[in-house]
Image (cartoon, helix red, strand yellow):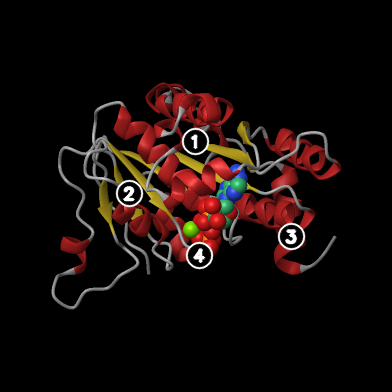
Amino acid sequence: MLITPRQNKLNKIVILNPKGGCGKSTLATNLAACYATRGTTPAIMDYDPQGSTTGWLARRSDELPAIHGIAAYKKSMQATRSWQLRVPSETETLIIDSPASVDHDDLRELTRDSTSILVPVLPSSMDIHAASRCIADLLLVAKVDRRDRKLAVVANRTRKNTKSFATLMRFLDSLGIPIIAVLRDTQNFVRSAEQGLGVCEMQPSRVKPDVEQIEKIASWLDAWPQRRRESNSTTSIEKPPSAARSLFRRTHFGSA
Ligand SMILES: Nc1ncnc2c1ncn2[C@@H]1O[C@H](COP(=O)(O)OP(=O)(O)OP(=O)(O)O)[C@@H](O)[C@H]1O
Ligand SMILES: [Mg+2]
């Protein structure tokens, strides 16, 4: 069972998609570096069993803006679980890098009190199917309310003019879920990961389009208090969209 903090006013950003290799850790590290360069120390909670963000932090130079790492995938016998998972009280932003497989209880726990949920998606039809299922679970199992507008997709390693991208766009459009950024397929993400950097900390002339997309995501994330205020002022009760319900039936019970 995963455990995540219950700290009021914490900007809790969850990066999630049970499909392995879709870019969760890449997104987590790049957003952490982006927040760190602004001058406040973000925290990353690493639930990836490969310890990807923990390894990235270990490779990060001490001279770079600080990021607090929490190796949540490790279980220590020397400390209580809550001590192991504590987030420093001054932390404003917590980024959670989730594991590839998440059961329904973990999904509820991960998303509870979250301010934003990002689902990175690769462009293949198998990945899009997995992402659609993940989104259906978020809406129908974790009961993420679409009116909160906390859920968004980041298209990763994507060429925009493909059939599968158009299919993903149509599905998300029918649910009113935005694609807030499109990350291109580039070695810049691989090289920055090797050096414990975010793309925003690399030679600017090489990474301009990549930094623009990461900053676009950060701007969307920054608007969470406004989205929350607007959602609190919405009172009507809305059923889950039929697209999500029919998808849930198809993916969980195999019916068309
Ligand atoms: N936009 C990109 N361009 C090029 N390489 C990328 C891009 N995004 C991710 N990668 C590479 O793809 C691999 C998988 O990415 P990453 O580790 O972020 O996925 P993940 O979803 O965290 O995987 P897992 O589910 O195994 O934890 C990594 O080697 C990463 O450097
Ligand atoms: Mg990972």
Cβ–Cβ below 8 Å for labels 4 and 2? no
**Distance from Cα at disc 3 to Cα at disc 4:** 19 Å
Of badges 4 and 2, the one in the foreground is 2
- Looking at the image, tell me whether mark 3 or mark 2 is earlier in sequence order: 2
Residue that numbered label 3 is attached to = 249
Residue 112 lies, in percent from the top left, at 39, 49
Cβ–Cβ below 8 Å for labels 1 and 2? no
Q: Which mark is residue 44?
A: 2
**Residue displayed at 76% across by 52% down:** 124
Residue type of the residue flagged with mark 1: Lys
Q: How many marks?
A: 4
Of badges 1 and 2, the one in the foreground is 2
Q: Examine the rendered structure and indicate whether residue 45 appears above or below residue 92.
A: below
Residue that numbered label 1 is attached to = 150
**Distance from Cα at disc 3 to Cα at disc 2:** 34 Å
**Residue displayed at 59% across by 62% down:** 20
* Crowd class of label 4 (few under 14; some 14 to 19; many from 20; radius 10 Å): some
Q: Determine the image quadrant of residue 223.
A: top left
Q: Secondary structure at mark 3?
A: helix
